[in-house]
Amino acid sequence: MKHEVDLKDYKIRTDLLIDEVDTFEEKTIETEENFVDDICINSTRVLRDNAIKQKGIYTTISFQDVTDRDNFQKVQKVFEKELHKVIDNLKLKKNYKTLVIGLGNSSSTPDSLGVKVCDNIIVTRHLYELDEASKDYHNVASFTPNVMGNTGIEAQDIIRGIVEEIDLDLIIVIDALASSKIERVNKTIQLTDTGISPGSGVGNYRKEISKNILGVPVIAIGVPTVVDAAIIVSDTIDLLIKKIEYMKNNNPKEKLKARDKVNFLKEKREELNLQEKENLLGLVGSLSENDLRSLIYDVLTPIGYNMMVTPKEIDFIIEKLSLLISKGINNVLHETEI
Amino acid sequence: MKHEVDLKDYKIRTDLLIDEVDTFEEKTIETEENFVDDICINSTRVLRDNAIKQKGIYTTISFQDVTDRDNFQKVQKVFEKELHKVIDNLKLKKNYKTLVIGLGNSSSTPDSLGVKVCDNIIVTRHLYELDEASKDYHNVASFTPNVMGNTGIEAQDIIRGIVEEIDLDLIIVIDALASSKIERVNKTIQLTDTGISPGSGVGNYRKEISKNILGVPVIAIGVPTVVDAAIIVSDTIDLLIKKIEYMKNNNPKEKLKARDKVNFLKEKREELNLQEKENLLGLVGSLSENDLRSLIYDVLTPIGYNMMVTPKEIDFIIEKLSLLISKGINNVLHETEI
Amino acid sequence: MKHEVDLKDYKIRTDLLIDEVDTFEEKTIETEENFVDDICINSTRVLRDNAIKQKGIYTTISFQDVTDRDNFQKVQKVFEKELHKVIDNLKLKKNYKTLVIGLGNSSSTPDSLGVKVCDNIIVTRHLYELDEASKDYHNVASFTPNVMGNTGIEAQDIIRGIVEEIDLDLIIVIDALASSKIERVNKTIQLTDTGISPGSGVGNYRKEISKNILGVPVIAIGVPTVVDAAIIVSDTIDLLIKKIEYMKNNNPKEKLKARDKVNFLKEKREELNLQEKENLLGLVGSLSENDLRSLIYDVLTPIGYNMMVTPKEIDFIIEKLSLLISKGINNVLHETEI
Amino acid sequence: MKHEVDLKDYKIRTDLLIDEVDTFEEKTIETEENFVDDICINSTRVLRDNAIKQKGIYTTISFQDVTDRDNFQKVQKVFEKELHKVIDNLKLKKNYKTLVIGLGNSSSTPDSLGVKVCDNIIVTRHLYELDEASKDYHNVASFTPNVMGNTGIEAQDIIRGIVEEIDLDLIIVIDALASSKIERVNKTIQLTDTGISPGSGVGNYRKEISKNILGVPVIAIGVPTVVDAAIIVSDTIDLLIKKIEYMKNNNPKEKLKARDKVNFLKEKREELNLQEKENLLGLVGSLSENDLRSLIYDVLTPIGYNMMVTPKEIDFIIEKLSLLISKGINNVLHETEI
């Protein structure tokens, strides 16, 4: 029945390599996974530029709740170690000069991560210019270009202008990202040496911010803080199918406990066959995940629902994540605990 | 098949009377609708307390874009006129004293409406206390109790405390609301003389703020700024059914233009019969709207997806809406254009 | 006795031409003064560059309280008219493109004027780039470079970078200034076509922002929001002399009313002779105003008192002044009332 | 000559006991001073209520720069220890419930200390109400009543209202204070078990916040962030006298180095006799410190110079001080390092 539905080619909106890692051909990437307790560190090297991602190293740190004090510290340590690796890899000169750029919009909570990180960066470049810098601190500047809706200017244009005026060895860009998986929202930090690509983020800038454009290595640090409305719909339909299936095959009176239910849903993910899906969800059940999302997107777009989905406690989480990332950057750049 | 699915009784989360006006029995409400250009003013009198809403008058102003300058002014005039009516109805003494309370959380953009309105309220009570007030201004105080997650204290407890300490004739409470209809988000202002009921808002307070509790008339002004994730899912499924149906019955090659598509979807809303729905969406299609939402809610809850859906440009819209409401309140309370 | 005191050459810190207009040689400036009610508009043309100010036109609008509603509107109209004149004078092409730059630090109330003005500027440049601009609005971008203490980068470097990247016909820079006269604080707007000179402002940037540097005409709009601590000391000593003199010559029991006292102090300003001053204030009384300030500055500096003096209600006044200036700029640039 | 000048009784505005400790009669106070490196801890017990201060214990921690990382940590430890002592002294029950109140105005940098401290307080009361609190955290609520100019309501009225609604064992109030000594600004923390007295702070509230009024012990924590303009004038005149005296007695060519000059000025403070002072400063030199201030205040008041004096980098210092105090309170209340 699928051919009856007219689907345009809809690219699922995500800025995370890990969301798409399964779609890469085998020989185009090398992946390694390590764990510190329940924190997962996935390092993927994309071997050549392709339609999805630029060649480079993508490190994805996946964790649970950073609003828990102990976990916060564990994740911070992991983040620092991984940031150190990415920087070491660039083989910069000893006293490299860094510009930390916070993208996004301080007035929109889920998009304020980059700005909030910059609020806490220890800035010393002006002291170096005045020969008043302490030797304990490296040369660091920081900047927030704001979003085009507020300034009328692309972030990339502003950044390119500044980079031409000051002497730099490294740029670190921090940004709130979009994910295609709800479960990654606020629970993932992505570090990459490829910079920021077109179409990224909550959608407020469009031009690449990378070494190609700026002539200086660009490390991008991002956290997914929203998903597109289309994604929550298709994810829920996916879960619905599995739940109903489960209920039909089991005694409906016997309720699953929350935790069991989640595990069950995760485990059984790929097991239903097409016929079963169609019984449960009719035509919709017979669509591939990608086609379903295209259809949902197609339905939502004309109605003007340019919606984002974000947790209700987003302000508190952004506070913690921005603190974690700024502390990590300060510790690594200034090579000392602060 | 429906009986096989174990559905708990899930109350769709909305703070708008207009979302539920169809569920009232005929003789329990009186409704009147007027238009100023394309701005619709619905005045509904709920004649007796019931499970859904308290007895009182609910005025719902529905409009399009307030980011357009001309429309902004039109909506502001309508809002002022309706606020005037609600206050006149209370038959307060001539020099009534007002407390304007902004509920919500200034750190979370969609929940910041009430706080931002209070930022612009012209406050004079202290000048009256010092006998320094100009006669051009009435006696107005203003207050923002913040949310329980930040203070540890229920907004109602704080408000009750203040109301006991100062002499008042009227309370106006402003709050960001939740709607069950995406199309109402940021496009509706609800005024009511019943105050704020339990379970309202973006969910940060739970106790009623009303004349019953406080002994002073309470006018509540609210704008829906978010919908629950469960709603966007069920709305989309609803739209999906209609879209697929349309495609099956028409030449799929012939694409609908965006505007036609929206109208089509709206018009055909109730026309599909159960069998058609089941063909298209299987078991899910056979569920009533309410049961579908219960099911979705049930699926989303254990996974911890306590998500809200909000437009991407929410910061800009909140800016405009808070300006509109604060200007309106200032003009009405101080009985002069400011 | 004066020669016994070792005074370094201390330049009184002010950004206002009007504070120094008396020190210019006669033929180097042309001045004209007009009034709208009690609002004074001083237009001074500096005919050639000199040690104090660059060649150009300086318009100084002096007013009383802008927290009064009626006066606010009067001052806004005057400001708009004068801004119009300065822009007309530049003979720009018809659809000129403007960048509005807000200097200063949003975290420091008296230094936040420029940033707050930019918060309210209607920005359209991105819509022009996307060919989505309404014809009712001119091409305007806006930007806040923040201060060197927060970014590590001079504002001028950031601005120079941006100006190289985007096509512009006019730059408007807004900044909080320092005055050498307490009575001017928050009661003066200076407009000039010369840009911002070194050493200006609350002291957070040092490099010139002008047509010379940027290749685009620069209009600077400033309001003095602070005075240096040295100034309040010398002004008070000046007032003290006059008060004591008055008291000696009059019945001390007979108190002056506040208003009389102010007028008296203003009128008698220059009338005391040196001998009288010395009797009243000893050595200090015999110093010229400039030498006294140098001495005070010399005394304060080593103790690290890098202090500013500002009114206690500065937050409220900055709110009003930034609204006034942003409304004025919007109306002039977009050539329509908004 | 002094009697010729008509001086009203002007109370120098300070909230610090230490500024006035010399004016107490010998047997009315007990004082103890201790040092941790160069941090001075003065504990003064006022034995009975008097015109200046209420009976109670006042702890004054004096320190140098808290923007230095190491010093920050030292001062934090001292503050924690002293706060612990003050709380222990109250002999509260084991699981006492605390309300932390941040006074002041978040829009005015020098007055924002209390609000910024509350931003970082770990709040748990609502979790206790819901029986979801972790045993690692005590029962803490937090609240910011804002200032009367913004709300129209006295802070005390709001606080009294809240205290009546919730069950409490301890109130901690944080506030920006005024000092009469410039050198104490941002370099002193005062803790006292007497609460906040009338006339305190940057001047935005007037009614006492204390156990007498609220029925619950009130610990007040304050930092002087401003001095009155009158103080900087009289302090400078004081320094001027000494500087001129020094110059007359020494070779004026031979300049003092900054550090020597400061020490010299401090040491010679009380040594000039009246005749010398009069020679140097005439009539003004003959006035007592208090009379001079009264005179300055009398001169400044009618002209409407309601000015405060504050360091130019106040935003950065407030950031650090609020972090220090909030960390300290969190550690003490939750009895664990966070």
Image: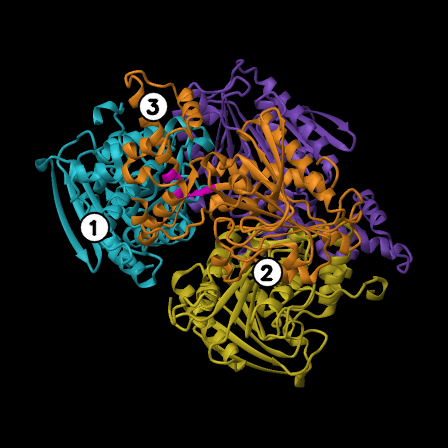
Chain colours: A cyan, B orange, C purple, D yellow
Q: Nearer the viewer, residue A244 or B271?
A: B271
State which quarter of the image contains the C terminus of chain D.
Answer: bottom left
- Indicate the chain on which mark 1 is placed: A
Q: Which residue is mark 2?
A: B158
**Which label sits in the foreground, 2 or 3?**
3
Query: Could you say where residue B264 lies in the image, as x and y percent from the top left?
Result: 41, 23
Q: CA distance from mark 2 to mark 3?
A: 54 Å
Q: Is residue B232 magenta?
A: yes
Q: Which residue is mark 3?
A: B246
Quadrant hosting residue B208: bottom right
Query: Could you say where residue A13 lies in the image, as x and y percent from the top left?
Result: 29, 34
Element type at mark 3 = helix
Element type at mark 2 = helix
The amino acid type, in three-letter code, at marker 1 is Asn
Quadrant hosting residue A331: bottom left
The residue depicted at 84 percent of the width and 66 percent of the height is D3
Q: Residue furthest top?
A: C94
Do discs 2 and 3 share a chain? Answer: yes
In the depicted structure, whether residue C238 falls above or below residue D123 = above
Q: Mark 2 Cα within 10 Å, few/some/many (few <14, many 20+)?
A: many
Q: Is residue A129 visible?
A: no
